[in-house]
Structure formats: structure tokens, C-alpha cells
Amino acid sequence: MTDTFSGNLENTVAQTGGEGPGPGPASVAACWSCKGPVSAGALFCPVCEAVQPPGQMDHFQRLGLQAAFDIDPDSLDRLYFDLQRRLHPDRFATRTPREKAFSQSQATSLNEAYEALKDPLRRADYLVHLRGSGVLREGCNQINDPVILMEAMELREALAEAQTREEVDRIATETEADIADCLIGLSAAFRGNDLDGACGLTTRLKYLTKLADEARVHRKALAEN
Amino acid sequence: MVLLQIHEPGETPVPHDDDKGLAIGIDLGTTNSVVAISSDGKPEVLRDEDGQALVPSVVAYAADGSAVVGGMARQLLLDRPECVIGSVKRLMGRGVGDLKSLAGTLPFDVDTADGGQDTELSMVRLKVAGHRLTPVEISADILKALKERTEEHLGGTVDRAVITVPAYFDDAARTATKDAARLAGLQVLRLVNEPTAAALAYGLDKGAEGLYAVYDLGGGTFDISVLRMEKGVFQVLATGGDAALGGDDFDHAIAGHFLSQRAAGRDAGEGSDPLTSNEAKIVLMTARLAKECLSRQDGGEWMLGMDGDPSRHALDRTMLESLIEPLVERTIHICRGVMEDAKVTPTDISGVVLVGGSTRVPLVRRKVAELFGAEPLADIDPDEVVAVGAALQAEALTVGSDTLLLDVTPLSLGIETMGGMVEKIIPRNTPVPVAKAQEFTTYQDGQTAMSIQVLQGEREMTDQCRSLARFDLRGIPPMTAGAARVRVTFAVDADGLLTVVAAEDTTGIEAQVEVKPSYGLTEEELSAMLHDSMKHAAADMSRRLLTEARVESERALMALRAALEVDGDLLSAGETSELEKVMAQVEEANAGDDRDSIAAAAETLENASRPFAERRMDRGIRRALGGVSVEDLEQKTEQLEKPEPVAAKARGL
Ligand SMILES: [Zn+2]
């Protein structure tokens, strides 16, 4: 009863290949409950059915999705709900403290993955990081494209100077349209494996989203005065 | 082999199979509380002989400390206000500075002498009938009464419950609620947010699907949640509210009006004495009666009889509505913000469910209908629906169910940074459970400790947010300034409660986290209360530990049996029978009531089965290396329906 909640890494005793991040199909860990072999990343022990600690895997793998920008929001929800149905702490309320703890970390990892993939901006950012790790170390936070930089500054200025709700609405509508364009562009860039293009568009999407939020705040302030 | 059963003097053996007992649902309200029970998916609200489900959350104390809870206590309020206390939920996890006064007087007798402690930053202590009690203890007395009532009704023990809390309750108030349950001898299976519980009850009953808003205005708290409901999934998209806005505030507004009328009818010098806290309680109660009456009729007259000098006060519905309109407007404003957070507009909402007694006020219904552009759904009892949802969830947690509640954090969680700024770590409306890690470093050479202030709220500055706790990290290895990397993980569990873990990254040394809850009780205070005020608390605690040891040991037995089933050929006949002998001893220990023997037997079993486990791992690895994937292996050995490993699933898509 003195075991710590050691994760899979510590218990992994055989690594026999498998490419990329995440567990290879043949890596084996010991089940904390029956001590028998469990494939790394498995949710439950196939022998004693004990819930396992969450394995090391990327957000797409965690939800059973191919790593891609184009995902169907409905099927994302479906996969997320199905997994939560089996892993949520509510399913383990009368179990041992260790099962409760593992269920909580499984559900936590699922929530993290779901939150990262649900929103297109966060999904784009994550996918660039995932595909381009090692290549694009700073991620997509730098505005180094002078065209994008100019556009960002001009739009912000216009918003700051907007005096009427109509003006704010016009900027907001334009921004929404730009966001839609950005998403279409991102989809094409990721499909064509154009990481630099995807990174630029992610940056643009980031400030456009911020601008849309600011327009909302600005609009509310005008409405209240 | 018979094990000697040893019991503490006075402690009797506890009955077995406490796992099979019913778990109940409790709506612990500001004004009223309700208990419900569910079996076979059929929830039932507990009622007294008169058919009343609502138990007033009012406690009357006698000089000997014994407590009367409910309608009887409320009747005593007018005659013996100094012995009676209500609306204590508003004080859960609150400091003196949070209390709301009536004309400068609190309707509570607050004990300010606090042994030199910083009273501004500790939980309120109240003086009732000569006793000094915390809101936690008073809530515990309400829960105890509810528990006893239910046990009488069921003719058996009840020791597990789902308790609902306002969605907007912060960590301190949630912890205080859990502490109260512990004092009352109840194990909290889950704290469920009130609007979520109501959505569960409503959704399951009506088969509702789509986007719904739950508008919950209770006695002391306001919540608004936007949920997506479909096929047994209840996903909260956003929630918001005000933990200090409810029907009580309507009462305060009306009482303030009565008092100014009374003052205006008198000379300046006369009757300007400040109210006593007992008088404040009486004026508030009169105001409540007026409010309830005006939900049904258009006008009336009420009397305040203080100082033997009665005054009469007429009030009609129009006047009442002008008094409470700013408060109702505030709820509407919060609703708009929550819809924005959920990225929905009123037209996206399929229906608005009204919850809480204060939604009976006609002005509230009108304003809600106006905002959502549709008549709110009131085909459920707004006073009972939360308890029904709690009971359904209690059954789901103990017996099992296919429904899934996915809730979110109501408030952003952050830490104090340089210059009193707040750095948000977990934003509001993040699905729970959630964990976020943050790295800290030292600013002095050789620094071995640091202090972190944890805050909850939406504002940018520390002093505008609510302090939850201060964490002291100790045992950081001495290094040069900026070299240590202390990784602090903030985790919010499914009850909405925060835990903090810290470790130094470069050395892997775990830093100790010392929590000083800002408004809560320390573990020592709570233990002292458990010790002092509850004779059976020790028995409760040891029974809980016994159950835990048993559950743990049964899990181990079950796992070993399953392993023997698939890999039993790895043991010789002699080894198998040796192991079975040890398993029989574990079973025997589990049948007894001695926690230590259960733990000892479980450990013996773990040691005895170790060689078997090693051989199983060897076989597993050999198969993996031999090209048979573990998935294939699993498929071959599967006898029952097994969950599919996620990695295999990913490839299938
Ligand atoms: Zn196992």
C-alpha cells in the first residue's frame, strides 16, 4: 500500500518501437492493481478492469482523432462525451482512493485536450506546435510579417476612434469576415502541409479574435453610456 | 482462524454492507432545505405529516446547546430572536466584512473578540443563546436534523449524500459546506451546482434537448447557467451569478423602506436609536411576509412593534417592484454576460427553467421573459427541483447511470504577482476537473521558502479579488536567485475544490505546501469541533476508514482473481493453493471489523502475489517483443466486454 501514483513512464518496461510522440502500440506498462501487463495509453486494464493513469499522448490521440485542422465539431463532442462517460470521477464515486485519483487525472487530461481542440484558434496553434516542434520554436506569436503588422495597427486604431455603435458594428462585421477567411486559409495551409503559411494565419487569427473581443467590449461601453 | 475483535470502550461494532445504503440528495438552502431520495430512477421528495417538503433553514438553540431545526425554530424567531438563527448559508466561508447590515445593524450577533486573530480574514463567529458558533457548525446542525428526519422516514442509517451548492459559490464556501457535512456525520459523494442539479431533474423528466438556461434565484444566492442537454449529457457551457443576491435582499430592501417610513413618522430625536440585532431579525421577517403576500395579492398593511411603539406600513405591488427592480436588473445583467461567455444569444435558447423560491415574484418572471423573449418554464416546483436533481445524482454515483454531468469553474482562479496584480491561471467556465501548472522562481540567493497568494475573481487587482488562501512553499533547495524552478499545480476537482501541489523541477524535490484558508477552518479547528461537539464523530470516522480499507482490499482481491483467470497457468498447483490460502485470509479479515487486520492481510496478499505478478509481466513483455501486440493479446484473453484502448481506437479512424 505504499506505492506512489507513478505514471506510465516509470512503469514502462518495454519500448519496442512506435513512431512520433505518444505510446507505440507495443509498449507495456504494469497495471497498478493486478500488476499484470497493460499496453501504455490503455484506459482500463484488460484483465482486472482497473482505470489506468492517463498515458503520454497528444490531444488528438487522447480523443481518438487524426491530427488535422479540419475536424467535425459534432464528432469531437461525441468522442469527448463517450470518453468522459467512462472516465469521469462521477463513475468512481464509491471506488478506492487510487481509482478516484486516476479517474480525476484521466478526466483532467480529456478536458485539456477537448478545450485545446474545440476552438479553431487554439487548435491551429496546437497543431503548428505539434507538427513544427523543433522548427518553429517561438510558436506563432511573433508578428514579423509587415503586411499583417500594418493591418493589425490600422484596425486597432479604427476601433479606438470609433464613436458610434454603427462604426463599431462595421469593424466587428469586417473582423468576423476576416476571421472566416482566415479559417478557410488555415484549413488549406494545413492540408497542404504549409506550416509557415499556417503559422502566419494563426498569428493573424489571434489578433483578429482579440480585435473582435475588443469590439464587443467597446460596443457594450457605448451602449451603456 | 478467528481474529480478535478489539473495540474502543463504548464503541459498538458497526453493521456491514454500509455500501448498499441509500444515498440522499440535499438542497441546503438559505431559507429552506429539501431532502429527496431516488431509487430505480424514481426520485421522491421527503415530506412531513402535513405534506411539507420545505424545512426552514432556521436553528433555535437552547442554553444546553441542543438545537431545534425547521418550522418550530422559525416560530421562535419572533419571541426569542437571540436564540434563533437563519440565512446562515450567506455566511459560509465569509468574513465579517462580507456581512450585510440593516440600517447599520447586522441581523446576527457577531463575536468580534477572536483571540488576537485577524478577524477581517477569518470566518465569522456568531453568538447565539450564549454559544459561540461558526456558520459551519450551524449548517451542520441543519444537516444533522435533515439526516435524522430521513433516517426516521427510511428506518435505516443514512451516511452519504449529494449536497447542492450555488454554482457561484467560491472555494471557501464549498469547503465550508463540505466541513459542515463532515460535522453532521455525512459523507459528501459530490457537491453539485444547484442549476446543474435542476437541469438534470428537469431534463430527465421532460426529455429536454437543446440549449437551456437555468435561472436560479434563491433566498441568498443567484445563479444563471447555460447548458447543452442531449441524450443524457448535461454540459454546462457557462455559469455566473452572485453569491450574495437573493430573496433576502428583497427583504432587506422592503425592511429598509419600512424603517425609513417609521423614521419619517417620528420626530428627529425620537426612535433614532440604532436597531438591535434582534430587532433587525424581526423587521426582516416582517418584510419577508410582506413580499410573499404581494406575490399573490396587490397590496396590504404590516405592523412593526418595536420598543412597545407600533407603526403601520402599507405597501402595494407597484411600490414593492420599484424597491426590488435594481436587484432584479442586476440578475438580468449577469444573464447577458453569461450568454456572451457561452457565445449564445437569447434566440439560441430553447427554454429557460426557473428555480428557487424567489422566482415566484412576478417582476422576476416578467424580466426573465423579456430578456429571453419567451415565457420561462415553470412546470416544475422551483423549490423542489434542485433536491430532486441531487437525489438523482446520488443514485447515479452509488448505483450507476448513463447520464453525464459536465460542469465548469464559476470564477477565475489566479495568483498574486508583483505590484498586487492578478495573474489568471484557470479562467472561469473551464470544464472541471482541471489542472494547470505554473512555474515560480526564487528572487534571492539561497531562498528556501516562498509564499503564494491564491485569489478567485474576475478583476485585475489583488484587492478586488477574493483571497482564497495563502500557500507557503518550504523545503526549496538553496540555489542562486532565479535558478530554482518551482512548479506549482493548481487542480480543481469535480466538486469545484482546489488543491495545490508543488515540486522543484531541477532537483525533483517536493516542496511542502502549507494552506492557510483565508475564511475557512483549519484542519485543527475542524478536528477540535469534531472532537468536542460530536460524540459519535470518532465512530463515524473509524467506520469510514474501515469501509475504505475494505473497498481497497476487495479491489485487490478482485484484481488477483481476474489475473488468475487469465494467467493462472503461470503458477504450479502448489503455488496456486498457497495463494488461495492467503486470499481466504483476506476474505476473512474483510468480514471482520478490524481495519488493521484488513490492511495487514492485504499487505500479506500483495507480497505473496508478487512472484506471480512478475511472471505475468515477463509474459506480457515477451509477447510484445515477439510481435504480438498487447491489444491482440487483450482481445484473445478478453472474456467480458472490455473498454477499447484509446490508442487502438485512434488508428481505426
Ligand atoms: Zn489489472
Image: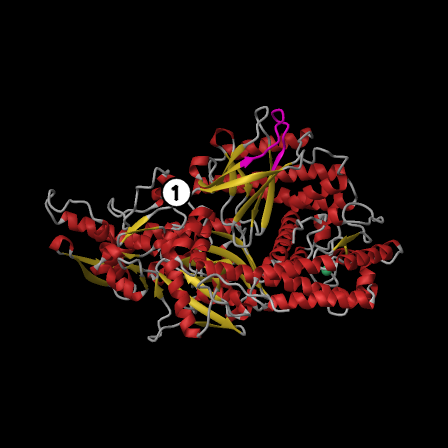
Residue B582, given in percent of the width and then of the height, sits at: 70, 65
Which residue matches tag 1?
B122
The answer to if B478 sits in the magenta stretch is yes
> Which quadrant of the figure contains the N terminus of chain B?
bottom right
Residue A99, given in percent of the width and then of the height, sits at: 63, 57
Residue A79, given in percent of the width and then of the height, sits at: 68, 58
Task: Looking at this view, name the residue that lies furthest to the right.
Answer: B626
Residue occupying image coordinates x 68% and y 36%: A140
The image quadrant that residue B321 belongs to is: bottom left
> Is B19 in front, or is B461?
B19
> Is A148 in front, or is B539?
B539
- Amino acid type of the residue tagged 1 in the rendering: Ser
> Is B279 in front, or is B488?
B488
> Which quadrant of the figure contains the C terminus of chain B?
bottom right
The secondary structure that most of the magenta stretch takes on is: loop
Looking at the image, is B100 positioned above or below residue B451? below
> How many badges with numbers are in the image?
1
The answer to if B6 sits in the magenta stretch is no
The image quadrant that residue A142 belongs to is: top right
- Does the beta carbon of the residue at mark 1 sit less than 8 Å from ligand 1? no
Task: Specify start and end residues of the magenta stretch as a single range.
Answer: B473-487
What's the image's color scheme? secondary structure
> Is B520 in front, or is B201?
B520
Is residue B79 visible in this depiction of the protein? yes
Residue occupying image coordinates x 43% and y 57%: B183
Quadrant of ligand 1: it is bottom right
Residue A172, given in percent of the width and then of the height, sits at: 55, 42
